[in-house]
Image (cartoon, rainbow, N blue to C red):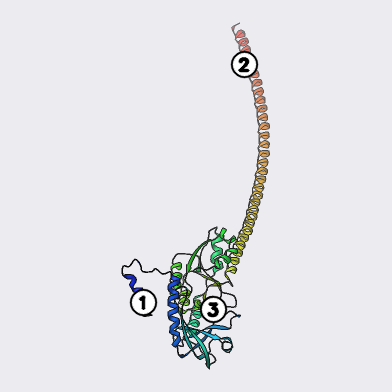
Amino acid sequence: MSNLFNATLMSDQPNNNFPTYKPSELIAIFSAALGRQNEFAKLVNLRGIYQQRQNNPNWSYAYAGLHDESSQDEITLRIAKDLHETLIDGNLITVTGILERKIDPRGSVQITLNVTRVEKLQEQAVSLADQKKAELRRHKSQTGFRNVDGVLEKRLLADERPRVALLLANNSITMSDFEAGIQAAKAAIDFTEFRSDFFKAAPLCQRLCEIDSQGFDVIAVVRGGGIGIERLDNLDVLETLSHLNTPVISAVGHPEERLTFKEIADKEVATPTALGQYLNELVERVADMKAKSKALLVQQVSKQYADQIASLEKRLTKQEKDFKEERAGYVEREKRNVEEMANMKNKVAWMANKLNERKRIITLLAVGLVAVVGIMIWIALR
């Protein structure tokens, strides 16, 4: 092992003939070195709380977790199926086995205990982790779950495009399944894809906080089920999830995989594909609501205009009636005025005739008077 490190350090020295390794070659070298150390391995005894994991039913062995009673640390157990089937989640146990160390394709050293014996100390032990999970569930219940449907529907009804962040695991193929059910939703919703390492709590928490600060309407965490799904129940991840300001949809795992992560999220859908179906149905439902709303609005406006037209026609009919009555009154008044004018003319003519008669009488009287006076004068002069 020391020779390997010495050879590696020589790369700092200028030597054009020094070999250049590929990552796979370097991992193979270290795996071989670590494997040789297991030749002198001894049995070790470990105590902790048993945590079941998802396993392939065809395997002759099972993988599980041994959780520390007083911290969040956990080691992987490789255990025979007959021993595995005697245990359940939460059993406080002591296990005996041989430690195995190997390097995974990402360059991380994996420590696994190959279990040979198991002693059950307590049927059910409540760890600090379980207590913390219960506290986070209570906290979420007290602060309240956000109405994801209401948030998205409000945007869509206002003819706005909701912004949804999709958080997927690095190198995940979940997106292909998700795409099958999301095509229709893309016509009304803007999706932004983010990636993160779901196996490590720190980068996942950092990514969630980063997305939370970007003003999305909803964050959808998307991951298929299987090995490693329990990493989402890391206490740091759950703590971060419970304090996000943005509503969160959980679309992780399979329906039978029970996770506190699903319980703390504001909305849970069974699988990534179900998330696409949910969003499709939401868009279609809102479109139907808008269509019905428009039809109702048209009906209301039509009724309003019909009422206004009827009211206007009624007013016009009344005005026409009032006009006809007023006109009839005017004609009647004009008729009376004409009759009065005719009567007045007749009176004037009659008075004119009377005046002319009086003038003739006065003239005759005057002529007679003059004649009498003349006769009298003539008689007097004789």
- Circle 1 or circle 3, nearest the eye: 1
Looking at the image, residue 325 lies above or below residue 368:
below
Please, what is the three-letter code of the amino acid marked with disc 2? Ala
Residue 193 vs residue 266, the one in the foreground = 193
Residue at the top extreme, as displayed: 382
Which mark sits nearer the N-terminus, 2 or 3? 3
Q: Residue at x 67, y 42 (%)?
A: 325
Give the amino acid at mark 3: Leu
Identify the mark at residue 366; answer none if there is no mark: 2
- Residue 350: x percent and y percent? 67, 25
Disc 2 and disc 3: Cα gap in Å? Answer: 143 Å
CA gap, disc 1 and disc 3:
42 Å
Q: Which residue is mark 1?
A: 5
For the N terminus, which image quadrant?
bottom left
Residue 259 tag number: 3
Q: On the picture, is 321 further left or further right than 129? A: right
The residue most toward the front is: 17
Question: Pointer 3: residues within 10 angstroms few (<14), some, or many (20+)?
Answer: some
Q: Mark 3 or mark 1, which is nearer the start of the sequence?
A: 1
Q: Position of residue 339 (x, y in %)?
A: 68, 32
Helix, strand, or loop for circle 3?
Answer: loop
Q: Secondary structure at mark 1?
A: helix
